[in-house]
Image: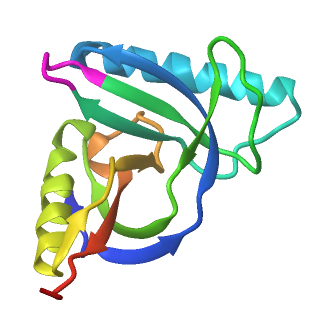
Amino acid sequence: MGIEQPETRTAVVQPTAVRRATLAQAELVNWFAEAYGEIAAYLGLHGLTPKGHPFARYHVRADGRFDVEAGFPIAGRIAGDCSVQPSTLPGGELAVVWYVGPYDQVGKAYAALADWISSQGGETDGEAWEIYYEPPTGDPSHWRTEVVQPYHLVSSDG
């Protein structure tokens, strides 16, 4: 298990196909399996394939539940239906860190990334997301997750 040194990259806006929900933490695991399967079926029905690994964005609500968006990057915008919807991942400056280990400890990667951004004279700029490179099977200590955080440098102009 571990967290690698954060790095930066510049990205363009990435179209995505997603499902959204508001869930308690205990509901997340089962919902993800259903959501990714439903999105994959939608894409297949429309002759599309994902252009990358599955991702998820979380926003913690005041009531302790999560507003969750999960999906896949795709080549262009989709029409969507009552369940699968079009969305995007933001472009711009991104700070990223690789985390290897079980999902319930990925918060350490968020903390390391926030500390690194601050040490570089930056601030977060919107919601972070996770990209999952390993299916959640087998030994969790080998699961690879990339945590991505939009950010910007704070101007030193007074």
Residue name at image x 28 percent, y 33 percent: 59
Task: Quadrant for the C terminus, please.
Answer: bottom left
Give residue 55's position: percent from left, percent from top.
48, 42
Residue 137, visible in the rendered structure: yes
In the displayed orientation, state which residue is furthest to the right.
47
Write down the quadrant of residue 25 in the picture.
Answer: top left
Identify whether 95 is placed above or below 59. Answer: below
Task: Quadrant for the N terminus, please.
Answer: bottom left
Residue 143, visible in the rendered structure: no
69 to the left or right of 151: right
Instruction: Look at the image and give the residue range highlighted in magenta.
Output: 61-66
Write down the quadrant of residue 88 in the picture.
Answer: top right
Identify whether 29 is placed above or below 135. Answer: above
- The verdict on residue 64 being magenta is yes
In-front residue for pair 25/2: 25
Residue name at image x 70 percent, y 46 percent: 74
Residue name at image x 24 percent, y 14 percent: 24
In the displayed orientation, state which residue is furthest to the front.
158
Which secondary structure is most common in the magenta stretch? loop
